[in-house]
Amino acid sequence: MMTRRAFAKTVAIAGFPAIIPAKVLGQDAPSNTIQIGQLGFGRIGKSMDVPGILGCKGVKFVAVSDVDTKRMGYAKEYLDATYAKQNTSVDLRRYQDFREMLAQKDVDAISISTPDHWHSEPAVMAAFAGKDIYMQKPASLTIREGRLVSNAVRDNKRVFLLGSQQRSSEQFHRACELVRNGRLGKISMIEIGLPGDPAGGRTQEMPVPENLNYDLWLGSTPDVFYTEDRVHSQNDPKLDSRPGWLRCEQFGAGMITGWGSHHLDIAHWAMGWEDSGPREIEGKGIFHTKGLWDVHGDYDITMTYADGTKMRIWEKYPNGLRFIGEKGWIFVSRGAAKMTASDPVSPGRELKALDASDPALLEGAIGENEIRLYRHRGNHHQNWIDCIRSRKETIVPAETAHRSCSACLLAHIGMKLARKLTWDSAAEQFVNDDEANALLAREERAPYGTRRAYERLNTKA
């Protein structure tokens, strides 16, 4: 852990005030209320993360940060109205630059609901600032970034939870325990269905809105001209439209991480692969070339793990996971439930949340001597708050999040190169493949970047 002097020096270099959070100095919090800073107030922040945290007892939002001041105004309106219904109020501080919010000593924890390219850098900075972290998936834009997030959280002893909320759902927990305890016998294949994204998007340059710090929004990614379809709508007070950045490879990998982070995480949980990854990757994908949006559309990837189990990810499968073993199959999905209005719906008949080739496979209690997986029910954010108080590990800690995201990014690299790849999950390197290894990181535009932040803040006293 850094000394006070070392931390003050590094935050000054980072460009925000050297105000030291109490937890960095090992002091007790001023009260039992956990004070939250919200980073990003868009579609997911408003629909999932802020309401989820508000549903927990003993928490209070005291600050919000967004590069778009219009969205910060929406956040204030939303939180003022919510607290007024509870006959209370909060003096919500607003920061266009999140680094100023991280420097506030009374902010105990940070909820990160930003675009994918702004996940790992603030997570690393928050860990070194002594803040506990909730972060939306995916865990990172690249595998190298994800490793730095996990290391920063571990070394600074922070409580971290990823927004992989399927682990807090009954049917996913049940399916994983059944598979882990051999109810299907040896698993030979896991079939995962994910949606794809369409081509499109306007390509004409537009003036940057006065309310948007566009340079900060771009962050470590290349400097490109502003057009609304690569950022988010400026005429969406309900914050329920799907933003264009989700479909631009500059800012994410498309549905392979957008939904893949959910389903591959469940596959890893069921199979006990939470600290490893696939051994071989082979696949193909179609990448859009017309219009602004250039993430993948259709795809077909097969990954083989060390025990010989194959995982096939194909857009033609129904949205969910099917575990196929010696004794039959179990399928698990969200069924008819939708977390957001834009959640994809599989064509055809409505999917069951939990199904099997033989209903008897789903029956029977997990025995005392069998494997029992981490159990949390209901509000996923409550697990984060509970663990902040207990200092125990969450249901989706940083290393688990990194490994699940890494598998998604390996599938993406497999689509890009369209040839067989061999992965060493211990070394986190492709075997004898410089071309593939070059895709494990991206060049970072100064002064931003997860690597820059980590190296600066990891300086020893």
Image: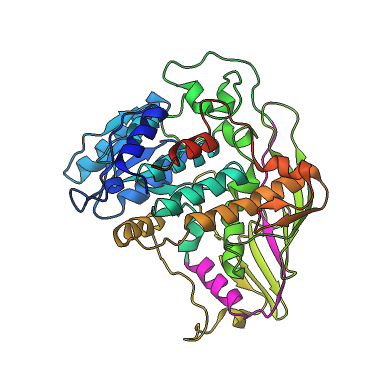
Look at the image and tell me in which quarter the C terminus lies.
top left
Q: Nearer the viewer, residue 224 or 380?
A: 224
- Expressed as whole percent of the image width and height from the top left, the position of residue 137 reads 52, 48
Instruction: Name the residue at 16% across, 44% down.
Output: 87
> From the viewer's perspective, is residue 452 above or below residue 354?
above
The magenta span reads 170-199
Write down the quadrant of residue 244 in the picture: top right
Write down the quadrant of residue 192 in the picture: bottom right
Q: How was this image coloured?
A: rainbow
> From the viewer's perspective, is residue 141 above or below residue 132?
above
- Expressed as whole percent of the image width and height from the top left, the position of residue 101 reads 33, 34
Q: Nearer the viewer, residue 143 or 229?
A: 143
Q: Is residue 193 magenta?
A: yes
- Expressed as whole percent of the image width and height from the top left, the position of residue 339 reads 48, 51
Instruction: Name the residue at 58% across, 20% down.
Output: 227
Q: Nearer the viewer, residue 48 or 155?
A: 155
Residue that lies at the very extreme toward the right in this rendered image: 419
- Expressed as whole percent of the image width and height from the top left, the position of residue 298 reads 75, 45
Q: Is residue 261 magenta?
A: no
Residue 298 in view here: no
Instruction: Name the residue at 66% across, 20% down.
Output: 203
Q: Is residue 6 left or right of residue 346?
A: left
Residue 385 in view here: yes
> From the viewer's perspective, is residue 206 above or below residue 229?
above
Q: Is residue 455 left or right of residue 438?
A: left
Residue that lies at the very extreme toward the top in this rendered image: 207
